[in-house]
Amino acid sequence: MHAVGSSPPEFTLVTQAGQTLQSPSLLGTIGFTAQAGDSGFIRVTATNIIGLESGGGAVGNLVSLPGQVTVIGRHPLLAASLGGGSTRILTLFGNPGSNYQMAFSTNLGSTNWQPGANMLMTNLQQNLNVNQAAPQLFIRIQP
């Protein structure tokens, strides 16, 4: 991802006269369009956050939680997570209308990958069913 211009983006939030901000509060969202290219998970963090009173004095306890942006290019992405009861969850990120083939193996050194599901993407992301009983699984997705 390339920054546009020589400086990072700067955002200003102004309250109405007499308005106070209660914490924690969602103060906004940011939208953007990524340039064409590779797929990837990109970490984002807000830094150098400053809160000022109308008189110019610093205020508040300002923090930012790190986030992640998922950029979907030509190739799909897989993300693994744990759900309730430590169940395995796989999320496939891909282009709507694309058909992806899943294959799996219990041994990464094996050349014997078993065919899994065919997935027609109807959204930008879909959760996949995972064999919860297998001690370990290696999964690959191909267009």
Image: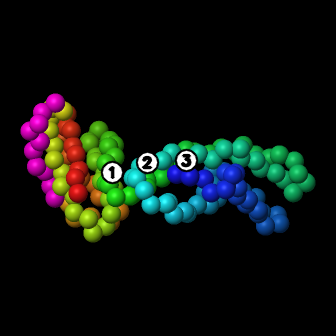
Mark 2 Cα shell of 10 Å, populated few (<14), some (14-19), many (≥20):
few
Compute the Cα span from label 1 to label 2.
9 Å
Which residue type carries mark 1?
Leu
Q: Which residue is mark 2?
A: 41
Compute the Cα span from label 2 to label 3.
10 Å
Residue 123 higher or lower than 7, as above or below? below
Looking at the rendered image, the quarter that the C terminus falls into is bottom left
Where does the image place residue 92, in percent across and percent down from the top left? 30, 54
Where does the image place residue 136, in percent across and percent down from the top left? 19, 33
Q: Which residue is mark 3?
A: 44
Contact (Cβ within 8 Å) of mark 1 with mark 3: no
Q: Which residues are magenta?
A: 109-118
The residue tagged with tag 3: helix, strand or loop?
Answer: strand
Residue beneath the point at 80% across and 47% down: 59
Residue beneath the point at 82% across and 64% down: 18
In which quarter of the view is residue 127 placed? bottom left
The residue tagged with tag 2: helix, strand or loop?
Answer: strand
Where does the image place residue 69, in percent across and percent down from the top left? 48, 52
In which quarter of the view is residue 125 placed? bottom left
Along the polypeptide, which appears first: circle 1 or circle 2? 2
Q: Which residue is mark 1?
A: 77
Residue beneath the point at 27% across and 69% down: 97
Residue 13 appears in the picture as rendered: yes
The residue tagged with tag 1: helix, strand or loop?
Answer: strand
